[in-house]
């Protein structure tokens, strides 16, 4: 049976796999592979006060942003690496309106082969509106798909998803728990004490309305 008990977001999630990109949609969001054209939005994001809760808490310059975007785009387009960055967009209230950039989420390479790390950052004006829960839930479905497809990260099949957040970041800790991650310990990272969460990606909490353009994988997830 699909585990939905802990989810704060219980709407639909659809995942569209293409050879060099992925697009994930939820009720309010479009979460798609990072592109070079996202640079201006990412500079605005990483120069905002949102960085206070992200990584080392420091704002990032244009060179840092360009380097990260190059890494994420190279993974998608050249290495066909599914463990990379996503731009988060809020859908318009009607289809004629262009989606609005609100943040970033990544399921990236972890510390060890077979491990992926989940992290996200939202522009300040879109925080505390449950967009983090919605995006986190979407990436949990994506991670589960990758595990069932035996996708490799650092030459080993995905077996563990990790995430960290600062001790006082209650909202992010709640998101981690809601998607089925377990707090394992506290550690010093990026110059501050952080909570460390992890989970078997096949055991992350799943939504009931899950769609994918790979039906065999979706079926395997529901029956596991």
Image (tube, rainbow, N blue to C red):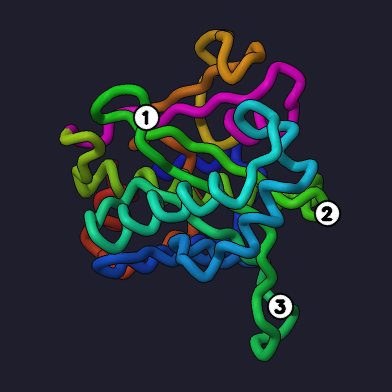
Few, some or many C-alpha atoms within 10 Å of disc 1 (few <14, some 14-19, many ≥20)?
A: some
Q: Which residue is mark 3?
A: 92
Q: In the rendered view, tell whether residue 166 sits above or below residue 124.
A: above
Q: State the residue in front, 154 or 22.
A: 154
Q: Which residue is mark 1?
A: 110
Q: Bounds of the magenta span?
A: 156-177
Q: In the rendered view, tell whether residue 11 sits above or below residue 152.
A: below
Left or right: 106 in relation to 6: left
What secondary structure is marked by label 3? loop
> Which residue is drawn at the image coordinates 29% and 63% (left, top)?
77
In primary-sequence order, the first of circles 1 and 2 is: 1
Residue 200: in sight, yes or no?
no
Instruction: Kindly report the distance in space between the C-alpha atoms of the residues bearing marks 3 and 2.
Output: 16 Å
Residue 11 located within the stretch drawn in magenta:
no
Residue 129 coordinates in the image, percent (x, y): 79, 51
What secondary structure is marked by label 1? loop
Residue 158: in sight, yes or no?
yes
Q: Which quadrant: the C terminus? A: top left
Left or right: 51 in relation to 182: right
Instruction: Kindly report the distance in space between the C-alpha atoms of the residues bearing marks 3 and 1.
Output: 34 Å
Question: Disc 1, disc 2: CB below 8 Å?
Answer: no
Residue 174 located within the stretch drawn in magenta:
yes
């Amino acid at each position: 049976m699909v585990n939905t008990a802990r989810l704060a977001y219980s709407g639909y999630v659809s995942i569209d796999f293409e050879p060099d990109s992925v697009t994930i949609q939820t009720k309010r969001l479009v979460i798609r592979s990072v592109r070079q054209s996202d640079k201006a939005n990412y500079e605005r994001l990483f120069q905002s006060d949102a960085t206070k809760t992200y990584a080392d808490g420091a704002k990032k310059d244009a060179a840092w942003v360009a380097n990260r975007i190059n890494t994420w785009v190279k993974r998608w387009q050249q290495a066909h690496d599914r463990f990379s960055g996503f731009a988060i967009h809020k859908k318009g209230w009607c289809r004629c309106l262009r989606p609005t950039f609100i943040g970033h989420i990544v399921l990236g390479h972890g510390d060890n082969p077979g491990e992926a790390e989940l992290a996200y950052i939202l522009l300040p004006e879109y925080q505390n509106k449950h967009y983090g829960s919605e995006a986190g839930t979407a990436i949990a479905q994506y991670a589960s798909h990758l595990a069932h497809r035996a996708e490799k990260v650092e030459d080993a099949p995905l077996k563990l998803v990790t995430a960290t957040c600062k001790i006082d970041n209650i909202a992010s800790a709640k998101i981690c728990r809601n998607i089925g991650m377990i707090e394992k310990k506290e550690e010093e990272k990026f110059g501050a004490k952080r909570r460390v969460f992890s989970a078997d990606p096949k055991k992350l909490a799943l939504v009931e309305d899950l769609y994918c353009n790979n039906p065999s994988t979706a079926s395997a997830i529901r029956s596991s």
